Image (cartoon, rainbow, N blue to C red):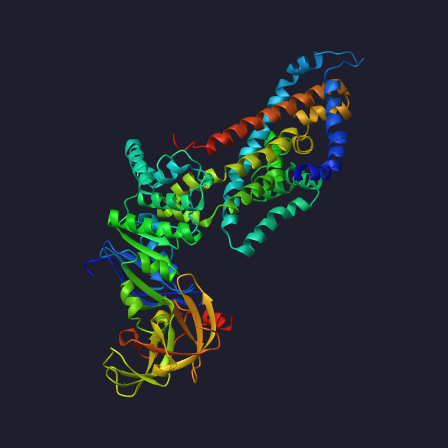
Amino acid sequence: MSNSVISLKDISVSFDGESILKNLNLDIDYGTFVTLLGPSGCGKTTTLRIIGGFVEPDSGDVFFSGERINDLPPHKRELNTVFQRYSLFPHLNVYENIAFGMRIKGKSESEIKDKVTAMLRLVALGGYEKRSVSTLSGGQQQRIAIARALANDPKVLLLDEPLGALDLKLRKEMQVELKRIQQKLGITFVYVTHDQEEALSMSDIIVVMNHGEIQQIGTPVDIYNEPENGFVADFIGESNIVDGIMHDDYDVEFCGARLKCVDSGFAKGEEIDVVIRPEDVVVIPVTDAKFCGTVLSSTFKGVHYEMIVEIPNQDEDWLIQSTVSQEVGREIGMTVEPENIHIMKKYTGDYAGDEEYADSAEG
Amino acid sequence: MAKKKNSWLAAPFGVWMAFFTLIPLGVVVYFALTDSAGAFTFDNLLGIGQHAGTLLRSIWLGAIATVLCLILGYPVAYSISRAKGVSQQTMVMLIMLPQWMNFLLRTYAWMTLLENNGLINKFLGLIGIGPLSMINTSGAVVLGMVYNFLPFMILPLYSVMTKIDKHTIEAAQDLGANGLNVFRRVILPLSVPGIITGITMVFVPAVSTFVISKLLGGGKDMLIGDLIEMLFAGTAVNYNVGSALSLVLMILIVVCMAVMNKFDDGEETGALIA
């Protein structure tokens, strides 16, 4: 807690009797880029709004630099928000939008002018002072919203799906831009998104949420490589999750095959979930294979082919990615390297991408 | 091209406008600039001076009524715009409801309320006050104007305020604005178009009314509307002077609105910079 700029303790919220957050605990360190990641309705935006002061938790405490701020209204909190739909002031020009917070604090005109100029340079929109906000493109409005928030020197910047409305190319550019700004200023960013790729590429720490509960907190690499449960594995990138049995340390059985793995510490004969990333499945001749399957479809995805493979006695078809396409209807052999087999305790909740996966399996 | 293709759709209205607005307007100008024999003259317009008092009184009372409507209507419009769906509709309904009754009937109703032995004075008599002389005063005229035209102030304000994004207000709070600052720096400037429309919709009918001043003012202090009515349909028929007065009133209103709109533009481009 000593190093946390924001601490949420046992936060619970419900709207109209529906529970949104359940006993949420979260510490956010100074100067980190933290992403709250999860499907829509997982409570990530509500968490952000609690930090911003726009939602009051039913129970639990919010701490800012060690001080309890539950009863502090939004305008007194030392943090600023970049809203999902920019929410720029339509009656003010770019200069006045950025100056808004400083005017309320009663800063001098020369101080305001310097800051606005510096902020516009930071977001690469120098010279836009006199423009009306309605003449700006979506990406430019987003930059102004970021400049407007940062002009107040907040200790923490909250960002609520700020890139959601931008097209793919612009979104990628802004991801790099945001990370650059965060590193340059060294302040804490709390970023909300449902886009796992966005989370992986920008964050220092990712907080994966589902149904109002935190599923896993970790670095992008940890979250991707060592998902703690099936939900995380499925939500972060695509995964094949299958039933398996742990015969002994480093000895797992799934799909009728016994393979070496790098996990230990499970009970002998314990039933577990095995997670295999689609890119980790290696296609080999049937004669050498640990397990086999029939190719149902093959789709060109640019860098690789994405294939759906039916494996005998398995409930779900496998998704595999390979740079070499296999003929549809052909039987292929497969294996997985020990370090690419991820073993998890059995997860009983919902899997995030089930529906989408089912769709692509049919198509 | 598409514009040109569809322009004939407005033709029926164009014909209507020509016959019932443009031609009558021309007739008014013709009468204003001629004498009873039909000869060209400026006398009618130059003679307006003797009615200046009536004209000023009309503008003065209309202005007071407009300001009162704004003061009363603004908070109401704001709270309706922030209310939840169903209660919002109910409140708009309640504001509209009196409008479904005939305008004359509503004004007559005020007569019976304000009369010397009317309902209000009878009630005041019970608690030992009065009787107050309320009917046939300028106050009664202003009251009648406010009562009849208040919805025309509330509705445009309400419709502009509902368009203010809730997130814009949150953004202001987020940037450090307390309630007063949110109002002064965001809600007020964003509702200016509604204020302009509201003022126009109240001021124009208030200035030119003659029914309200006749019924509630007792015809004592004549308003410009009464004078024009008298000159066309009353005891001192004179189409030429009547037309001149109408023309001057029309020009005055257009000038007032132009000034208001100028003010609106100034507000939008950054009156807050100063």
Residue visible at 36% across and 50% down? Answer: A174
Residue B164, given in percent of the width and then of the height, sits at 49, 45
Find residue B117 and report its image quarter.
Answer: top right
Is A279 left or right of A248, judged from the image as shown?
Answer: right
Which image quadrant: the N terminus of chain A? bottom left
Is A363 left or right of A52, judged from the image as shown?
Answer: right
Q: In this view, does A126 lie above or below A308?
A: above
Between residues A157 and B34, which one lies in front from this camera angle? A157
Q: In this view, does B87 lie above or below A149?
A: below
- Extreme residue in the left direction: A2
Residue visible at 76% across and 26% down? Answer: B23
Residue B53, given in percent of the width and then of the height, sits at 62, 19
- Extreme residue in the right direction: B37
Marks counted in the figure total 0
Residue B20, given in percent of the width and then of the height, sits at 76, 31
Q: In this view, does A137 lie above or below A114?
A: below
Question: Can residue A6 be seen at all in this image of the molecule?
Answer: yes
Between residues A345 and B182, which one lies in front from this camera angle? A345
Is B252 left or right of B232, judged from the image as shown?
Answer: left
Is A324 left or right of B56, judged from the image as shown?
Answer: left
Find residue A214 and report its image quarter.
Answer: bottom left
Question: Can residue A61 be seen at all in this image of the molecule?
Answer: no
Residue visible at 54% across and 30% down? Answer: B261
Residue B232, given in percent of the width and then of the height, sits at 76, 24
